[in-house]
Amino acid sequence: MTYLGLDIGTTATKAILVDDRQSVLAAATVPSRIDQPGPGLSEQDPETWVEGIRLALARLKATAPEPYAAIRAIGLSGQMHSVALLDDRLRPVRPALLWNDTRGQAQACRLQQDVPGLGRATGVRPMASFSAAKLLWIRENDPAAFAAMRHVLWAKDYVRLWLTGDLATDMSDAAGSQLFDQQNRAWYGPVCDYLGLGADRLPPLREGTDCAGRLRMDVARDLGLSPGVTVATGGGDTPVGAVGLGQVEAGQSFISLGTGAVYVTVQDAYAPDAEIRLHSFAHCVPRRWYQMAAMLNGASCLAWVAALCHESDIADLLRRVQKRGTRPSRVLFLPYLRGERTPYHDTDARGAFIGLDASCDAVDLARAVLEGVAFSLRQGQDLLAGQQPIAGPVALIGGGARSTEWAGIVATVLGRELVVPRHAEHACAIGAARLAMVADGWTTADAMPPFAAEKTTAPDRDAMPFYDERYACFRDVYPALRSIGRNAGPQDGLSGKSP
């Protein structure tokens, strides 16, 4: 028996084939095109998602023809928040606005004002990233498309519609739309009414582990698969990645250190923090939720400082950081190069180096950057731990997980053992395959075992007191510098916005 996991990402589509012991038999990745017609605009033609799946499956079929032909069920993971609008013939009426499209900022502010209680009900403050603000922007700026729209879907749901002919979404993708009542796992009437979205325009809600349809005969013939194959509902990439890591029990946690960074903890009840500084969303498995500290600045900060210092070999720079010792840098870095979400929810937040002198070099700056991102993760950890005790070691995935030096700093700053899972780069696709297994009749316990560790990083207990002192300083910096960043003129390169 084999199972197929599909991950429809922003920049690439991944497909993975596993057997009933979850051994990886074959994997394929296909790059995806993003259209950026102007500053802050980010779109994709939904057919890009289908074409990516076609190409990825052709590669799997060529690599492992016999296991491919034996696929019993298909699961899906997809980029969250990216909203597709379909007409009455189930065709896109315009390109999908992606999660990183920021044109709906003014609409997000109006949602905050006009729909009282929206943040607490939907688990997150209104932002341009989420589907509600995007839909309001489309209604006001592309009224013809809004009028033609009969169905709203998200990336993995559009692919499943092609596979099965059935409309549906899961709780986790709905959770990331800001149209969803997290507590009751149902569409949230007040915001849907405000946007003019009737219940018939939103898809039926299912759990991510449900069978949401069967593979259509014509699509099966086109793909070289058996008709009637089970297709699971699937879920958004963050919770499905958690499933791929076996993170389905309360207190289990992982950090993804990529361009940005997220720190995720599973919950068994919906319990948003009082100030809505964390994202609180429904999980893609039944009776589970998760909280997420979302940081916009992660490995992108390291790439930035390396380019600034004309360091073309980042791996060599990290080795030199490690040689310098285990104590904190004498320079403190505020990593807000692109604003920040957790804990400040401030798009105008700005970065800073503090403590520079004439002897500082690239190694000092690089270490300060690694520490600044780690301190930001600790702020997230403090908030998460205040809501739900964090159990056991924390999984570390993403590009930053490949750096032994950075993992050591993060472990020491957090005071926690970090574990890099095996096949971490395929966490979302493996999670999708696991959802397919449950839809095919497996129990959650059997289909979602804990991850196997590739390497473990323990905190440096001797260095922890020094990092605790630096962290206390780090927390004081943002409030002190916030007004400077907001009030600086464009010529200063800080804000460009009026106070």
Image (cartoon, helix red, strand yellow):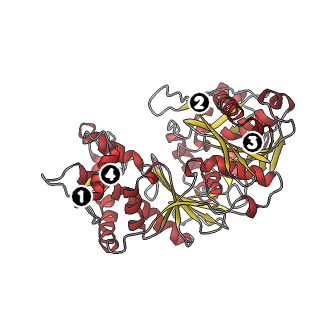
Residue 447 falls in image quadrant: bottom right
- In the image, 369 versus 92, the foreground residue is 369
According to the picture, the residue beneath numbered tag 2 turns out to be: 44
Residue 189 visible in the picture: no
Q: Nearer the viewer, mark 2 or mark 1?
A: 1
Q: Which residue corresponds to mark 1?
A: 331
**Residue 407 at x, y = what percent?**
42, 59
How far apart marks 1 and 3 lie (CA) works out to 51 Å
Left or right, 432 with respect to 426, comes to right
Q: Residue at left 51%, top 39%?
A: 100
Q: Which of marks 3 and 2 precedes in the sequence? A: 2
- Indicate left or right for 130 with 156 as reference: left
Residue occupied by mark 3: 202
Tag 4: amino acid: Leu
SS for dot 3: loop
Q: Does label 4 or label 2 sit earlier along the sequence?
A: 2
Q: Nearer the viewer, residue 215 or 165?
A: 215
Q: Nearer the viewer, mark 4 or mark 3?
A: 4
**Left or right placement of residue 264 versus residue 297 in this view:** right
CA distance for labels 4 and 3: 48 Å
Disc 2 + disc 3, Cβ < 8 Å: no
Which numbered disc, 1 or 3, marks the residue that appears first in the sequence? Answer: 3
Q: Amino acid at mark 2?
A: Gln
Residue marked by disc 4: 318
